[in-house]
Image (spheres, rainbow, N blue to C red):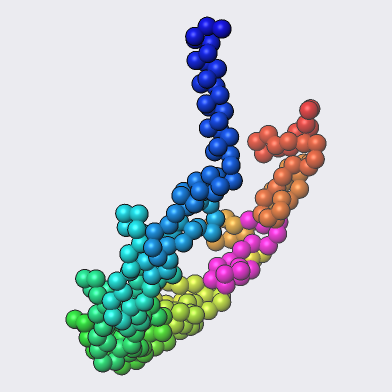
Amino acid sequence: MSIQSLRRTASCRFLIALLALASWPGVAAAQQDAAAAAPLNAHKKTHGDGWECDRGYRSVRLSCVAVDVPPNAYLDSSGSGWKCNRGFREAGGTCAEINVPADAFLASSGSAWECRRGYRNVDQSCVAVEVPPNAHLASSYRGGWECDRGYRRLGRSCVAIAVPENAYLDSSGDRWKCERGFRQSGDSCARLEIPQQGFIGRSGNDWDCNRGYRKRDASCVAVEMPMNAHLGYSGNSWTCDSGYRQQGEMCTKDRG
């Protein structure tokens, strides 16, 4: 056997010996312990390999240091940070108490304040809302007012709405609408002039023609239909019968 063959045989035997040594239970356990070694105030992760700091500590350069929680604060849900208590807000790494002015209350967040209903925020204080006559405090938002029904806003006051004859206040209460059978004409309501074969429409403030008639200026005229046609869905126009198609004002046999 040559010297090179002897060297290759020796190398193979050495490699096999190393692999066998690594597979021994004691050596494998030692390797796992070394890989999972955690610093002080840390624990092995529940899932996966590695470690994580205990609650109240945070990771800094492969070590776990205590979270410095200032007065009036608490550890957050992650356990590696902090939040201020209700009634306090963060200010330069500390928790400063929120100064709630008179006629105000802590907001639901606990980190700000809001004025009570009937007051508004002016320069970090709450001042009473001045409600003019014929008005009331707004319910949709804080710090404002709305005119009563039948009045409309004009600057900082509420003026009465002049409702003409044959009209009424609409659902908003700040404008008027003509009654059924009347149409708005400027600031008044004029009675509808309904022609023959006409009727008051769905809106109540205009008129339509009966079926088989159509509008022409201020009157209703009969719909003129050609042969092989019938009234359409609206009743105010015509369409060709099945098997016919329109050509101008006539219906001609459809040749396919």
Q: Give the residue at x 54% y 71%.
A: 205
**Residue placed at 35% from the left, 62% from the top?**
64
For residue 127, which quarter of the picture?
Answer: bottom left
Residue 49 placed where, x, y %? 50, 51
Q: Is 202 within the magenta?
A: yes
Q: Nearer the viewer, residue 98 or 69?
A: 69
- Residue 66 visible in the picture: yes
- In this rendering, the answer to whether 188 lies above or below 195 is below
Q: Foreground residue, 42 or 129?
A: 42
Count of marks, rendered view = 0
Q: Nearer the viewer, residue 185 or 14?
A: 14
- Farthest-out residue, left: 123
Q: At 31% from the left edge and 54% from the top edge, which residue is drawn?
A: 61
Q: Considering the image in quadrants, where does the N terminus appear?
A: top right
Q: Is residue 181 left or right of residue 70?
A: right
Q: Relative to residue 201, is residue 82 drawn left or right?
A: left
Q: Position of residue 159 (x, y in %)?
A: 31, 86
Q: In which quarter of the image is the C terminus?
A: top right
- The x and y percentages for residue 153 are 32, 81
Residue 230: within the magenta? no
Q: Can residue 154 be seen in this view?
A: no
Across and down, in percent, residue 154 comes to 28, 80
Image: 55 above or below 165? above
Part of the protein shown in magenta? 199-214
Taking the image as shown, residue 256 lies to the left or right of residue 207, namely right
Question: From what the image shows, is residue 248 above or below residue 99?
Answer: above
Which residue is most to the top?
A: 2
- For residue 126, which quarter of the picture? bottom left
Q: Residue at 49% of width from left, 58% of height from top?
A: 44
